[in-house]
Image (cartoon, grey):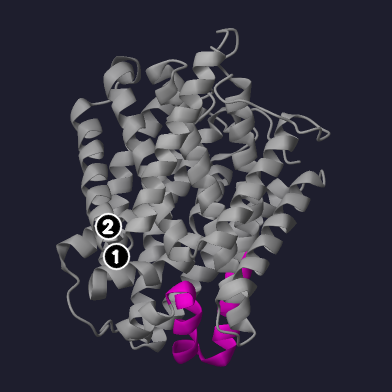
Amino acid sequence: MTEYRKDSITLPGAVAMGTGVMIGAGILALTGQMAELAGPLFPLSFLAGALVTAFSAYSYIKVSNAFPSAGGIAMILVKAYGPTTVAAGAALLMALSMVINESLVARTFASYTLRGFGVEPGGWPVAALGVAVIVFAWLVNVSGNRSVGIFSVLMAVLKVGGIALFGMAALWAGGLSFEPAGGDAGAGGFLASVALAVLAFKGFTTITNSGAEITRPHRNVGRAIILSIAICVVVYLLVALAVGASLPLERIIAAKDYALAEAAEPALGRTGFYLTVALAVVATASGLIASVFAVSRMLAMLTDMQLIPHRHFKMPGGVQDHTLVYTVVIAGLLTVFFDLSRIASLGVFFYLVMDMLVHWGVFRSLREETGARAEILLTAIALDVLVLSAFAALKWQTDPTIVAIAVGGMAAVFLFVGMFLRLHPPSGEHHGHQ
């Protein structure tokens, strides 16, 4: 399994890691969903999402600069709230949002793969292929292949470069014009689409979780986060404009699970279509390998901090070997029972609630230690509330079931960790993870 040593990740490596996680299912699967919500203004959703993410990143940068070896988001929450139900619940929401993203990646992989073979994605073939790629990612992680880290960086460069080239080529082939047909979706639809855009940027938290392993972390963690978000803004905007220039809005929405592949053919021909499908398959598979490791590592960290229970169910190996299994089982179940739209919706709810709890914790307890400015922290919370409220209101109208599942799921998480901590209070001997 890939292990990073202290000070083993350079600034370029950290940027590659952040962009590699961000540029994957986010742009491949969410572009069409955002177009469905925002109408012809969907490229601007990425810019608005970047603005919300920039305020959001402030808390993580400030805490990471002050405590670069503190063990990522879980330790930010513990420093802010102590080893409490709020800290454990929010940290578990973060881990689950990452697992949800894995199922999003898996179904995106399946959709693009099937589209490459001329099959309309849907039903059991998507679920079966999605589960298969999750199992593949698990096998790679348990194989003991220490070159996975290098492979992930190389794949990140290929993904960023390839998808950016697609955007430029498709935009050029479309005559540098952007004229998607369709009406105005309204302010509510636009704000709801911004919530999905934030989900496309959330991979920057991977850098926070690896702070102890980045060279000169007091400076480079913040720099890596800013650079990776900036790169993604450019790539996302290029791709959104290219898709809008190649397809009318109704076709983007109809092909929302594989919008890039659909946009590639009229702009770049059949060869461009197949190259885009191949790029999507590589991007999703490589991202999934890295994500499975990251989630299992975070769950192992929470176990180590005595914030969640652990059962090995007679499986061999250590804690992280077991959390790898839990990760792929949960991701596989989500892949089977939820479509891309519902998976993305769950991710939005879990991630933004966790994000608000991080900002409030920093505002309440860590402002003086980190030098964070209160007005920026409160603005970050207000922006999260704004886009989440718009998203929840729209989903309540169109798919109230997923809102109920999300709210019920979050309540279950906090009840679960609350009962566990009441029965098994943390000893106080080990709340860190190096």
Which segment is the magenta one?
256-282
Spatial CA span between label 2 and label 1? 6 Å
Residue drawn 60% across and 88% down?
A: 118
Taken as a whole, is the magenta stretch helix, strand or loop? helix
Q: Is residue 135 a member of the stretch shown in magenta?
A: no
Q: Nearer the viewer, residue 134 or 271?
A: 134
Label 1 element class? helix
Residue type (three-letter) at the residue carrying disc 2? Trp
Instruction: Residue 75 in the image: state x and y as whole percent.
Output: 49, 23
- Tell whether position 280 is magenta: yes
Q: Residues within 10 Å of mark 1 (few under 14, many from 20)?
A: few
Percent position of residue 371, x then y: 30, 21
The residue at the point 32 percent across, 72 percent down is 35
Relative to 232, say whether 29 is above or below: below
Image: 352 above or below 303: below
Mark 2 closeness class: few <14, some 14–19, many ≥20 residues within 10 Å: some
Residue tagged by mark 1?
398
Determine which quarter of the picture holds residue 77: top left
Residue denoted by label 2 = 396
| Visible residue check, residue 119 | yes
Q: Which amino acid type is marked by label 1? A: Thr
Q: Could you tell me which residue is drawn at 65 percent across and 85 percent down?
A: 117
Q: Is residue 44 above or below residue 173?
A: above
